[in-house]
Amino acid sequence: MATAVVIGGGVSGLASALYIQRSLPQFSKVILLEGSSRVGGWVNTTSYPDGAIFEHGPRSLRPVGEAGRNTLLLAEELGLTRHVLPIFPSDPAAKNRYLFVDGKLCALPTNAWSMFKKLPPFTKPLITSLWKEPFHRRSNEQDESIYSFVRRRLGPEFADIAIDALCRGIFAGDCRKLSVQACFPPLYEMEKKYGSLIAGAVFGFKDPKVEATGLVRRAIEDKWASWSLSKGLQQLTDAMAASIQNTKEGEIRLDTKVTSLKPNQNGKIIVSTPSDSIEASLVISAVYSKDLAAALPKSMTDLKEDLSALPSVNVVVVNLEYKENVLPVKGFGHLLPSFESGPILGVVYDSCTYPEHNRKGCPESTRITVMLGGSWYDKLLSPDGTLPSGSDIVWMASQAAAQQLGIKSHPIRSHVTLQKECLPQYKVGHVSWVEKVEQKIKESNLPLHLVGSSYRGPAINDCIYNAKKVVESLKTH
Ligand SMILES: Cc1cc2nc3c(=O)[nH]c(=O)nc-3n(C[C@H](O)[C@H](O)[C@H](O)COP(=O)(O)OP(=O)(O)OC[C@H]3O[C@@H](n4cnc5c(N)ncnc54)[C@H](O)[C@@H]3O)c2cc1C
Ligand SMILES: C=Cc1c2[nH]c(c1C)Cc1[nH]c(c(CCC(=O)O)c1C)Cc1[nH]c(c(C)c1CCC(=O)O)Cc1[nH]c(c(C)c1C=C)C2
């Protein structure tokens, strides 16, 4: 009886367990071990009895590309079709994103025409950077920072303002340190292959392989910008967990932290938890690389050191709800470049994106999420090095919202979550680091495989799709 063990019950671990059940029938037992008391990992939704929904982690998914289509397919297979909340291209949440610079909200260009206009905070129309872009020489470096790549190709102003803010709004990180090769592989490939981003965008488009039926077809035909679910994104991970447990092979054990992994003489791995030991023919690690390092035996010092080297950042997520409509603009949200504010990364206008998640009977109520910290987390700390109390953080976030959005009223409900080490930082050289750790695991001959946000992308779509690819690579032909 062959047993597969998946370590970690975030979206990557859940996807791994699901795909093992579907594609690797040689495993008569698939056991998912989760250290905490719930599945979902960073996917975490609070649903209040009055119908209001607060997301403390991810809140929307993109339907594009192979990975985006794959998640939609999975949602459909899990029976979630009627719960999908699409954002259409005409919705303000799809069209409007803002920067907060010099005390003002500045709309980012939304269409080709706006590229020809001088839109503050930029001092010249975007087209003036774009037309020169194909003439810049490609770099010979293996990797470089996102900042230096964009500065080289599109100029310093675009890098200092737009790219700086964008990296805060995806990685909560510093574009001067993050790797372009790891964080934006399509941009990196476009330059390497076509010598230019514009040429790459024109000639490099490939139709994704995932078949366009059902939800995928609807998303393509109606040009969805993004989507969520009627009960929030945790509905996806809850449905994944239910599907795993619905089969005779699948088992999820909560409050079960993996404390050690030891190879035995049969080429298997003994997976130990405080209460049990399991002999596994296959182990998929779906935890932060540092957490995997902590479970590996001392004899694997080299690999442990490598896995421990991946840095990550803390993000403080503050959900705020107001009784009335307090937003001066409609859109997805706004971001602050690092020169503006330090620790306040941005604000998501949740009630504008998903009004369905507002409390019942109060369509005018407003939900926003203020995100703080990331690479600037230290700036949030008190002089004694501690994080201010929850009520102080709510005050700080609501003051920021008041100043940036002109909100005069006080929130009627708030929720603060400290998401510790939640976003791994892919620094310059990250892709080589992934190759190195995977090579060392291969050389060890252990039946151990890596998935999760530490390696090939933090987006939910990446996590699910990479889990699928890893499991499918294990199929015996
Ligand atoms: C604030 C925020 C906003 C985000 N917004 C978006 C968004 O809008 N769109 C998007 O696509 N992505 C977004 N992301 C990114 C995305 O949510 C994460 O990258 C993704 O959820 C990571 O999933 P994972 O399964 O790889 O890891 P995790 O969610 O970290 O799961 C790992 C699991 O392993 C468990 N674990 C750890 N150690 C052990 C052990 N020794 N034994 C057993 N279990 C263990 C943990 O408890 C956890 O449940 C956001 C992330 C954050 C933090
Ligand atoms: C202000 C901080 C953050 C906001 N979201 C995140 C942080 C740290 C985390 C996050 N957001 C996205 C992803 C997934 C990336 C992907 O490839 O899909 C992650 C990990 C989605 C995202 N958010 C913004 C963009 C441009 C994207 C990429 C996908 C898309 O275009 O939708 C911008 C953005 N994020 C935040 C705000 C307020 C904002 C823009 C106004 C919040």
Image (cartoon, rainbow, N blue to C red):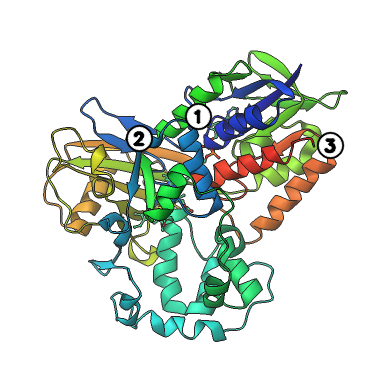
The amino acid type found where label 2 is placed reads His
Q: Position of residue 439 (x, y in %)?
A: 79, 47
| Residue 445, disc | 3
Give SS at disc 3. Answer: loop
Is residue 255 visible from the viewing direction of this image?
no
Which numbered disc, 2 or 1, marks the residue that appears first in the sequence? 2
Residue that label 1 marks: 240
Question: Is residue 101 positioned above or below 434 on the image?
Answer: below
Q: Quadrant of the N terminus?
A: top right
Q: Closest to the observer: 159 or 377?
A: 159
**Percent x, y of residue 427:** 59, 58
Q: Position of residue 245 (x, y in %)?
A: 54, 19
- Is 423 on the left or on the right of 169, as rendered? right
In the rendered image, the vertical position of residue 117 relative to residue 182, given as above or below: below
Q: Residue at x 45, y 81 (%)?
A: 130
Q: How many marks?
A: 3
User: Residue 30 shows which numbered tag?
Assistant: none
The residue type indicated by label 3 comes to Asn
> Decide: marks 1, 3 in contact (CB < 8 A)?
no
Q: Position of residue 276 (x, y in %)?
A: 67, 14
In the rendered image, which quarter contains the C terminus?
Answer: top right
Q: Residue at x 65, y 56 (%)?
A: 430
Q: Is residue 452 left or right of residue 372?
A: right
Crowd rating for badge 1 (residues with CA inside 10 Å; few <14, some 14–19, many 20+): many
**Which secondary structure, mark 2?**
helix
Q: CA distance from mark 1 to mark 3?
A: 30 Å
